[in-house]
Amino acid sequence: DTAVSQTPKYLVTQMGNDKSIKCEQNLGHDTMYWYKQDSKKFLKIMFSYNNKELIINETVPNRFSPKSPDKAHLNLHINSLELGDSAVYFCASSQGSGSPDTQYFGPGTRLTVL
Amino acid sequence: GNSVTQMEGPVTLSEEAFLTINCTYTATGYPSLFWYVQYPGEGLQLLLKATKADDKGSNKGFEATYRKETTSFHLEKGSVQVSDSAVYFCALSERGGGFKTIFGAGTRLFVKA
């Protein structure tokens, strides 16, 4: 049983396109996250949702828009893709926002912008 | 702001060698500390954690002790295996609109047979 799943695993697209990445968790967690990992493996938080509400919004271009239709799903839509958006994007979840929890990561989506 | 600094890699060891990966942190409060491991092509997974000073986290032969006086959380293993080859991330979790986790830059470990 996959705990945190993401689709697609690989995404290759042209500059200027719009794309979405989907994430689902079946752990019953309340909090979900999006991270960006660059080519040097540096991991940076982008967004966090708790029970469908945005609670962390780092300095991310507004071309990136997260959407949480329910607490088990957190999708990431990216408009007008740029070369610098190429990275691996990880979704994660944790039990709640009331204490520092272990995070459970998805397998990642490797985005390549040409 | 809060931050995590870990030793630069890559670290290359022979099988059965002793491993230390240094991690220090800066925090205004009392964060929880974590080590996560990322195997090739996979997402991160928790290796061990400690939630207060002097706690020792351990798992799969790895250990780390939360040292408040030196603001450190160094990862150690007595005898590494080829299967331990991965990228290791030190992290702290702080309150900030929910709990935000700040990751170190990661340290790549190669273990040779």
Image (spheres, rainbow, N blue to C red):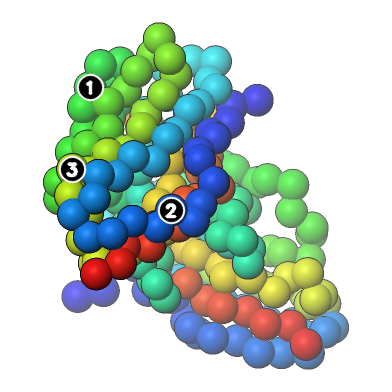
Q: Position of residue B2 (x, y in %)?
A: 59, 27
Q: Label 1 vs label 2: CA separation?
A: 26 Å
- Residue ID at (73%, 70%): A85
The relative height of residue B56 versus residue B48 in the rendered view (above or below) is: above
The amino acid pointed to by label 1 is: Asp
Residue B11 numbered mark, or none: 2
The crowding category of the residue bearing disc 2, from other C-alpha atoms within 10 Å (few below 14, some 14 to 19, many at least 20), is some
Left or right: where does residue A86 sit relative to residue A44?
A: right
At numbered mark 3, what does the secondary structure look like: helix, strand or loop? loop
Q: Is residue A36 visible?
A: no
User: Do pointers 2 and 3 mark residues of a single chain?
Assistant: yes
At numbered mark 2, what does the secondary structure look like: helix, strand or loop? strand
- Residue ID at (55%, 22%): B26
- Residue located beneath label 3 in the image: B78
Farthest residue to the top: give it: B69
Disc 1 versus disc 2: nearer the observer: 2
The amino acid pointed to by label 3 is: Gly
- Residue ID at (40%, 9%): B69
- Marks 1/2 in contact by CB < 8 Å: the verdict is no
- Residue located beneath label 1 in the image: B55
Q: Earlier in the sequence, mark 2 or mark 3?
A: 2
